[in-house]
Amino acid sequence: MRLLIDTDTASDDAVALMMALRDPDVTVEAITLVAGNVPLDRCVQNALYVAELCGYDGPVIAGADAPLMRELGTATEVHGEDGMGDIGLPLTGRTPAAGWGPQAIVDLVRANPGELTLVTLGPLTNLAIALLWAPDIVDLIPRVVCMAGTGLNGPGNVSPSAEFNVWVDPEACRVVLRSGLPLEFVGWDISISSAVVTPERAASIRALDTPFAHLALDVQAVLEVYADTETELDGPDLPDPIAMAHVLDPSAATVKRVHVDVAIGPDPMRGALIVDRYGFTGGTPNLDIVTDYPEDRFFELLAERLG
Ligand code: RIB
Ligand code: CA
């Protein structure tokens, strides 16, 4: 499996990156960065830190530093100021590859038609720019998996109806939804139902006793508090890692093909997915939305790659 990973690297993205980078059956062709959880330069440094830990020497390339048409909204209250739990990791001084994220996506897809799976773990700004500039890529990408949205009818995590990646850049999400790409969305509903690192799950991961397992838990320090005080979860949840699990093993998922649009405009509807479950709009179904991913299978895939 050959992957292109677009990410706003913070605490959960970092775990998803390690899952891909440590999978012997996966080749990561490039990691492109997009502003989201933290400003772009921090995403870049965080991704470079994880890449170095995993011995990855492929291209890590900066992309869009802001949404298409809005000011950047970050999530430092969720992931920490540095995005990696504010635990004092040495997250500076590394150098990304030359180039620009959207162009790297276009160039690699055109050079490898039909070969690459695109995984997005952050706002869809880079992918939208790539699509607007080079619409031909729609027919060259056989699979696109996005950690995006609230699933069929899950709660928002940044507003009552919106999930963060879509909320940051709803215009970019609409470009992607209307592109014709073969889309699969893994929503935050799947994260809170099947990817919560309870104390028991954390103990199992810690017992793996590898640098990857320890980092995966340590960088959740801020998210752990946020989950306890804000999202009422029994531990930090891992949306990007369970989206990566679906990339690696889609056979475990239950999906439903539906027509989806996105609300453009001000809060509280900004970034809300309009999931036409029963076909009221007559819109052509444009994505497979994951409606279930087994918790045990997720943690099995996670442990195999952190061990
Ligand atoms: O809503 C969760 C998503 O927003 C995850 O990708 C997390 O990393 C943040 O980007
Ligand atoms: Ca992310």
Image (cartoon, rainbow, N blue to C red):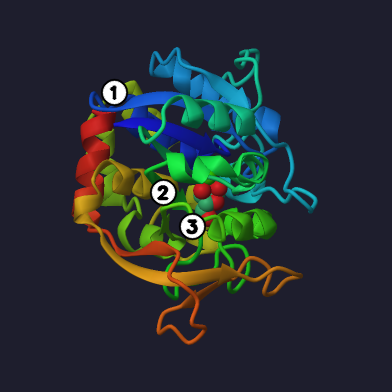
Q: Is residue 294 found left or right of 160 in the rendered image?
A: left
Q: Mark 1 or mark 3, which has the lower sequence index?
A: 1
Residue at 42%, 17% in the rendered image:
53
Element carrying mark 3:
helix
Which residue, given by chain and number where applicable, does mark 1 sit on? 210
Which residue, given by chain and number where applicable, does mark 3 sit on? 227
- Nearer to us in this view, 32 or 199: 32
| Amino acid type indicated by mark 2 | Val
| Amino acid type indicated by mark 3 | Ala
Residue at 27%, 59% in the rendered image:
293
**On screen, residue 139 above or below 106:** below
| Amino acid type indicated by mark 1 | Thr
Q: Mark 2 or mark 1, which has the lower sequence index?
A: 2
- Nearer to us in this view, 25 or 202: 25
Farthest bottom residue in view: 280
- Tell me the number on the disc at residue 145: 2
What separation in Å lies between label 2 and label 3 (alpha carbons)?
Answer: 25 Å
Residue at 79%, 53% in the rendered image:
70
Residue 58 visible to an observer of this rendering: yes
What separation in Å lies between label 1 and label 3 (alpha carbons)?
Answer: 25 Å
Nearer the observer, disc 2 or disc 1? 2
Nearer the observer, disc 2 or disc 3? 2
* Label 3 environment density (alpha carbons within 10 Å; few <14, some 14–19, many ≥20): some
**On screen, residue 270 above or below 103:** below
